[in-house]
Amino acid sequence: MLFAAKCYWPGVTEADLETIAHRATPTVSPTTPAAVTYLGSLLFTDDDLVLCLFDGPSRRAVKQASDRAGIPSERLMSSIWLGAGRHTVGIGRGSRCRRGTSASASVNEPDAKGAET
């Protein structure tokens, strides 16, 4: 499942987010048996706002991983990635290729013959 952690983070820099990226490696623990993957961040410098994107099995697992990485999130939101074009893209386990639902992350990549999928 895709989650976005909303962070009001005055003074945050790209270097801070690079540090977070190194800390937020996939994690497995007794309370979160499936890995949580940090996918990256969107930095809105004029607003001191960061959206950190995660793929994880549950809200709880993602919250624990973001806390361990030192991400000061004020809200964790279930998300759906809407890619360019006609397809909806869901990043993560259990994704399906159907319009209006989660799809694989390989939308619009050329196949072996060079045609877009």
Image (spheres, rainbow, N blue to C red):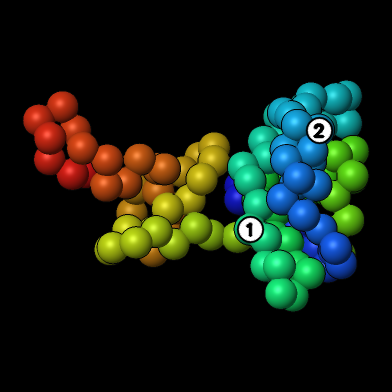
Query: Looking at the picture, how far across and down is residue 47, in whole percent?
Result: 74, 75
Label 2, label 1: how many angstroms apart (C-alpha)? 17 Å
Residue 42: mark in rendering: 1
Q: Amino acid at mark 1?
A: Leu
Disc 2 target residue: 23
Quarter of the figure with residue 88 = bottom left
Give the image location of residue 93, x and y in percent: 54, 37
Q: Secondary structure at mark 2?
A: helix
Up-down: is 57 above or below 31?
Answer: below
- Under circle 1, the secondary element is strand
Q: Nearer the viewer, residue 59 or 71?
A: 71
Residue 40 in sight from this viewpoint: yes
Foreground pick, 88 / 14: 14
- Looking at numbered disc 2 in the image, what kind of residue is underneath it? Arg
Identify which residue is drawn at 88% across, 31% down: 31
Characterize the local packing of mark 1: few (<14), some (14-19) or many (20 or more) Cα atoms within 10 angstroms. some
Toward the bottom, the furthest residue is 47
115 lies left or right of 48:
left
For the residues bearing labels 2 and 1, Cβ distance under 8 angstroms: no
In percent of width and height, residue 22 lies at: 75, 31
In-image side of 15 versus 100 (left or right): right
- Classify 116 as above or below 25: below
